[in-house]
Image: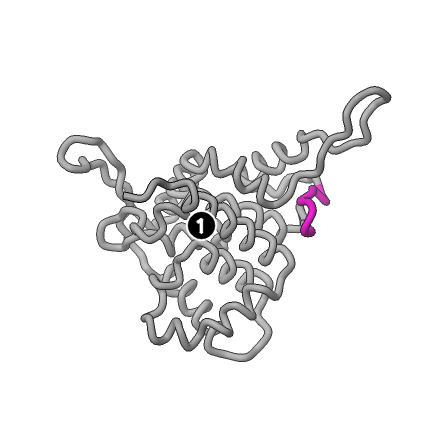
Amino acid sequence: MPLTLPEELLLLMLDDKTGRLNEAAGPASNYAIAAAILAELALQDRVDSDPQRMFVTNRSATGDSLLDSVLARMTAEPTDAPQRGEPAAQPHTSRWWIEVLARDADGYRDQLFARLVQRGILREEQGRFLWIFPERRYPVISDKEEREVKARLMGVIFQDEIPEPRDALLIGLVRAAGLLPLLLAPDALDAAQPRIDAVANLEELSRSLGNAVRDIFVEMARYTPMM
């Protein structure tokens, strides 16, 4: 069974040696996981988006418990025409949904880690951070899946063919979350940046999600006190 976009993204965020999320992914991880869930729902023809809104197109279950919980949440959000005297329900943008789902990113991550452990890709270890705080780490058992994801992305970046929508979305998410320096050396990244931008902008959903994630980070930086 192929990995979902959130599972692939989590593997790219993970430090293979320590079993922890890479520091470069720290500030971005909650929003990136939320965006990846929405992107997977879009790939499975359950949601779609335009610059003004993200909306459910198919309410039927996917068979994936994580995706279906988010789909049910989106379906329950009021979007129908209001009754007389009631205020009109406002459409929710991709950014709105990313911010809302990011609040529950810890729970989503736990589910994704559990799946990857069950599939024999990671193992769970209990440990202590700074010898005091309990933590769970997820060292890699099999790096086959991660290598395949990276090889697929490198193939898209360094070739001129039109990529599959899944690969374009993943590259857009990786770019928006600031993970590209984990995949490419600085010189290679500089040379490949025009192609990366072109691929990431191919899909309307990729542009929408990528712009939403980047806007959120800009605002975070704006209101973060200087040290």
Q: Position of residue 206 (x, y in %)?
A: 58, 57
Q: Is residue 76 above or below residue 171?
A: above
Q: Residue at x 38, y 56 (%)?
A: 12
Residue lying furthest front: 226
Q: Is residue 103 visible in the rendered structure shown here?
A: yes
Residue 92 drawn at (x, y percent): 66, 39
Residue 32 visible in this rendered orientation of the protein: no
Q: Residue furthest right?
A: 84
- The residue positioned 32% from the left and 44% from the top of the image is 226
Question: Which residue ends up furthest to the bottom in the rendered image?
Answer: 160
| Total numbered circles | 1
**74 in the magenta segment:** no
**Residue 56 belongs to the span the image colors magenta:** yes
Which residue is at 59% across, 58% downward?
Answer: 207
Question: Quadrant of the rendered structure where residue 147 is?
Answer: bottom left
Foreground: 16 or 124? 16
Region of the chain picked out in magenta, as a range: 50-58
Q: Which residue is mark 1?
A: 7
Residue displayed at 19% across by 37% down: 129
* Quadrant of the rendered image containing residue 135: top left
Q: Answer few, some or many: residues within 10 Å of disc 1's Cα (few below 14, many 20 plus, some between 14 and 19).
A: many
Q: Toward the viewer: 222 or 141?
A: 222
- Left or right of 138 on screen, residue 103: right
Colour scheme in the image?
one colour
